[in-house]
Amino acid sequence: MNEERFFEKICEAVIQGEGEAVVAAVKEALEAKVDAFSIVENGLTKGMDVVGEKFEKQEYFLPDLLIAAHAVKSAMELLKPHLATRAAGREAVVVIGTVEGDIHDIGKNLVASALEASGFKVIDLGVNVPPAEFVKGVKEHNPDIVACSALITATMVNIKDMINALKEAGVRDKIKIMVGGAPLSREFAESAGADYYGRTVRDAVVIAKNIVGEGN
Ligand code: B12
């Protein structure tokens, strides 16, 4: 089977919201040595995109979204060990969370899993994280990197508030800030005062490793 066929199968299982079929298709692809990062981008993420489109067209409703989201989550544990790249030499720390006002966590969780699999210690603050919680997380865990995910246009501006709060608390310069999520762009990241923008899970790992000087 060529790679495209594996991606189609995973994508279709996500669209149908069939967790077991997603897991089976991902397993099959991994056994055929399909790259795990490509499985995330071309299978799982693409499937969720179609689910989103169907939701917009009112062909799908909220329960369909939740079922598809659950199906993607069920494949995560399986994928995690395969998202590892060469392990970081020392245990660098990442504090991650979804911005305030936003409860989407599938992308964030994939990024967190990939970073963990690549040797980072990941402190996950969860979703809808207020700026003060990011400040608290940084003070408590003294991370190298703060990673933030945002999926909603109306609340992605809260990233700015988060960064300002880190500045006010005097901890901004001790860390690097990486942001990502579908509506974001490099331009937005710059204007918000972040250091890096990543479009994919693979970007997240590459950027994080470069930050701690472990880039390949
Ligand atoms: C699943 C889903 C939900 C689920 C979330 C389940 C969960 N546990 O996350 C539920 C049903 C709960 C939901 C709720 C809502 N949703 Co919704 N949802 C989606 C959907 C269909 C898929 C998102 C997803 O998980 N994609 C798969 C993951 C893997 O992709 P991703 O998150 O983009 O992550 C990738 C990259 O962006 C990147 N990445 C992500 N984070 C980070 C971070 C870093 C640091 C880096 C480097 C990279 C990175 O890596 C990932 C892999 O490539 C999208 C449509 C879409 N196509 O995106 C709408 C969508 C995001 N939702 C939307 C909306 C509006 C809502 C609601 C407000 C709906 C409502 N009216 O109630 C609520 C949110 C309430 C709130 N306050 O947050 C809109 C947002 C529109 C906008 N741009 O403003 C979208 C785009 C749908 C639409 N077209 O209208 N949603």
Image (tube, helix red, strand yellow):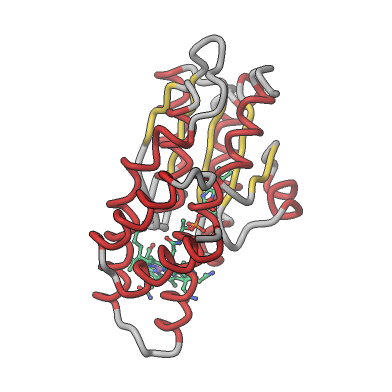
Q: Determine the residue positioned at 31% across, 75% down.
A: 16
Q: How many marks?
A: 0
Which corner quadrant of the image does residue 58 belong to? bottom left
Q: Determine the residue positioned at 69% across, 48% down.
A: 189
Note whether 5 is above or below 158 in the view shown.
below
Which corner quadrant of the image does residue 110 belong to? top left
Q: Determine the residue positioned at 38% across, 52% down.
A: 28
> Is 114 on the left or on the right of 74, as rendered?
right
Which corner quadrant of the image does residue 89 belong to? top right
Q: Determine the residue positioned at 54% across, 26% down.
A: 169
Picture quadrant of ligand 1: bottom left
Q: Residue furthest top?
A: 90
Quadrant in the picture for the C terminus: top right
> Is 47 on the left or on the right of 164, as rendered?
left
> Is 194 on the left or on the right of 90, as rendered?
right
Q: Residue furthest front?
A: 1
42, 140: nearer the viewer: 42
Residue 160: x percent and y percent?
A: 61, 47
Residue 10: x percent and y percent?
A: 41, 63
Residue 8: x percent and y percent?
A: 48, 68
Note whether 102 is above or below 114 in the view shown.
below
Note whether 55 is above or below 65 in the view shown.
below
26, 160: nearer the viewer: 26
25, 44: nearer the viewer: 25
Residue 185: x percent and y percent?
A: 69, 56
